[in-house]
Image (spheres, rainbow, N blue to C red):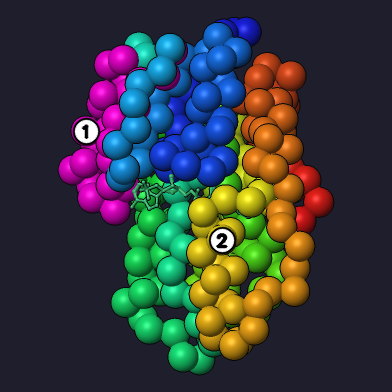
Amino acid sequence: MTSVYTVVIAGASSGFGAALAHDLAAAGHQVVAGARRPRPDAPRMRYVPVDLTDSEATHHFAQAAIEHLGRVDGLVYCAADPGAVQRAWQLDADAFARVLDVSLLGFVRLAGHLVPHMQQAGGGSIITVGSQAARTPVDLLAAYGAAKAALEHYSRCLAEELSGTGIRVNTIGIAAETELAATHRTAKAALRGRPSPHPPLPDVAESLPLARWLLSDQARHVTGQSIEANRP
Ligand SMILES: NC(=O)c1ccc[n+]([C@@H]2O[C@H](COP(=O)([O-])OP(=O)(O)OC[C@H]3O[C@@H](n4cnc5c(N)ncnc54)[C@H](OP(=O)(O)O)[C@@H]3O)[C@@H](O)[C@H]2O)c1
């Protein structure tokens, strides 16, 4: 990958995805960002609204990104559904399915369009945003953790199957004060009937350097890994 690169960020209307999109664009890289809520374009950042649970809309988003960027060097998948916060045995299957649809299948849909393009271009860096909840049970987040475990495993399979193609696939975990973190905290407090005992999470800026590095040439030998961006 050259020192200026082109990156698609999915799930970029708020939180980590929005912060990374603005950070990369400010550093001179070309970005196409998307999520359901509309957001304005910025210098070197084209925003394309997309619902990643909709196959046709996701296809359109991928096409728009390829047309705008010409070549896609990086793909960062940040989208996640904050719902289905519940006792594991009381989970509503439809709410669980929505979490899987956004956090796992949205990435499967998008990868289906962008990986062939990256293969043709001879390489690229893919980052999925996972969670510690994929490996450690977190109270009331069974659906979220299961979706992240599936995303992490799928990412490793992708890395393995793409080894030798120049396409790297890694999963990062973050810990940041975002809308998703606040939604989880509020839902947990409502279920427990008491506020969260945990202090606020770090600023999202602390999670950006790892993603920046994995997108860069410096990480060209790193694939199939799961790495925490900061102490959870
Ligand atoms: N914050 C943390 O401490 C933490 C810890 C571990 C992992 N993570 C992960 O970090 C990633 C970013 O989350 P965040 O913390 O930055 O929270 P966030 O601000 O809530 O970001 C989630 C993003 O996903 C998008 N999204 C949700 N459903 C979508 C859909 N159907 N189609 C397209 N986009 C959709 C949201 O945008 P719209 O609503 O506009 O669609 C939003 O841009 C997530 O994968 C999350 O699981 C966060």
Q: Which mark is residue 182?
A: 2
- Magenta stretch? 44-68
- The residue sitting at 64% across, 84% down in the picture is 194
Is residue 158 magenta-colored? no
- The residue sitting at 57% across, 50% down in the picture is 178
Residue 50 sits above or below residue 20 on the image: below
User: Is 203 on the left-hand or right-hand side of 118?
Assistant: right
- How many circles with numbers are drawn on the protein? 2
Q: Position of residue 190 (x, y in %)?
A: 53, 81
Q: Position of residue 212 (x, y in %)?
A: 66, 26
Residue 93 sits above or below residue 46 on the image: below
- If you read the primary sequence from the N terminus, does the residue marked by circle 2 or circle 1 appear first? 1
At label 1, which amino acid type do we have?
His
Is residue 48 magenta-colored? yes
- The residue sitting at 58% across, 23% down in the picture is 23
At label 2, which amino acid type do we have?
Ala
Residue 152 sits above or below residue 98 on the image: above
Which class describes the residues within 10 Å of circle 1: few (<14), some (14-19), or many (20+)? some
